[in-house]
Image: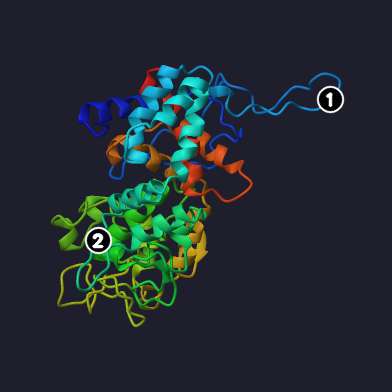
Amino acid sequence: MIRAPLVAGALALALGGCYSGQPAGGSGDGGATSSGAEAGSEASSTTAEGSSGGEASGGEASGSTGQPVDPDPLAELDRFTADDARHYLGTIAPMIVGRLLSESEHNLIDYFKGRGIAPVIEGWLEDPAFPETVRMMFQVKLSASGMTDEVNFELPGNLAAHIAREKLPYAEILTAEYCVDGGGAATPCDTGAPYAAGVLTTRAYLLANASRFNLRRARRMMYIFNCLAYPMDHVLQPPLEKLSLIEMFRAMTPDEQTVPEAQNGFGNGFACYSCHSQFGAHAQLFVKFDEQGVYHPEATGLQDPENELGRSQNGLFVSHFVDPVAAAQELSQVFGEPVADLRDAARVLSEHPTFYQCAARNTIEWTFGLSEAQASKTDLGLLIDLRDRLATLDHEPTIADIFRTTLTHPAVIDVVVGGG
């Protein structure tokens, strides 16, 4: 079983090795930053170097034409045998299409050997089971499924399946200006906000990640979609000015922490500024959503003096900003870019290089049954290469593109067949 702990552990170990292939786009790390575990430190920023062993991305002039030879995109699969292909595809098929290999797929492998990996996976991406796989993947990732009398926790999964089924850009997981009902039709999202931002503006996401100061909503957003953990590189995410924050989040040492609740165990109790100077910018995007995920235009972001630390009135949460005017606004910044609200922030997240690196890592995590901590050790050079390959497409990458590119990469195949 692919989710067996020993298998998952071995795969995590292999994926954490040093990838030595040359990125297809040849762009180095291109601004890639932390892809570490949510509670851990930043991952190595090692970039991919050397040669992949397949065809080069460019070509020397051929014959008398003087024209470059187009590389054969399947040539890098030639080193895999039919047995390799059968073992690899048989291992991952249950997680992608929920079944074993078919007779026709065995025939493709027998005929094309290693190259057979590509058409088999292509067939899976056209299978009606694939959108349902994507649904389940996001239900697990977002901890959102089922329904109550008040909240439809199926909305995030519905949107993910719709994006996969209709071959829409993957970025719509964050930028879609609509939600999707159980019948697959567009429907308004359920927060009451005057805008939509894909799964982020579903009560399912907001309720499942409600916490004081909106910390969990911000943390999960950055980790799930950009694989970034706090504290981040200051060039990537410029810190907020210390004096713009409420007193408890200005502390950089135990001596500087003067708020009793922080001294006695809230958060780290000290050194708050290192994380919250970045946290605060992202948490501010959620300041008008209450603990049930309902939008309140009148939210102030101010502490309720009769409630516990981090809670405002009417089930809302407290802003990091000390200025009452700033505390009540959705205005903020993400990766140093000013944003008007959560919808604007979702656009910035989806346009950043880490977005597709993270999508590839999430695909690996799901396919091989890894925990988030295990997946966080995936080699950054491999993720950069996958991102660069997606960047060569003549359209915005779809979920199918991400699965295809990731699962046909020789380094990913090697994890199962034991090569490299």
Q: Name the disc covering residue 208, or none.
A: 2
Q: In the rendered view, would you say 378 is above or below 342? A: above
Q: Nearer the viewer, residue 97 or 301?
A: 97
Q: Residues within 10 Å of mark 1 (few under 14, many from 20)?
A: few
Q: In the rendered view, would you say 346 is above or below 232? A: below
Q: Secondary structure at mark 2?
A: helix
Direction from residue 339 to residue 199 in the image, left or right: left
Q: In the rendered view, would you say 23 is above or below 127? A: above
Q: Residue at x 36, y 60 (%)?
A: 158
Q: Secondary structure at mark 1?
A: loop
Q: Name the disc covering residue 66, or none.
A: 1
> Where does the C terminus fall, quadrant-wise?
top left
- Labels 1, 2: front one: 1
Distance (Cα) linking label 1 and label 2: 60 Å
Tell me residue 272's x, y (percent): 28, 54
Tell me residue 111's x, y (percent): 51, 21
Amino acid type at circle 2 is Ala
Tell me residue 103's x, y (percent): 40, 29
Q: Residue at x 15, y 74 (%)?
A: 307
Q: Earlier in the sequence, mark 1 or mark 2?
A: 1
Q: How many marks?
A: 2
Direction from residue 116 to residue 83 in the image, left or right: left
Tell me residue 4's x, y (percent): 21, 31
In which quarter of the view is residue 323 placed? bottom left
In which quarter of the view is residue 219 placed? bottom left
Q: Nearer the viewer, residue 370 or 130?
A: 130
Direction from residue 234 to residue 253 in the image, left or right: left
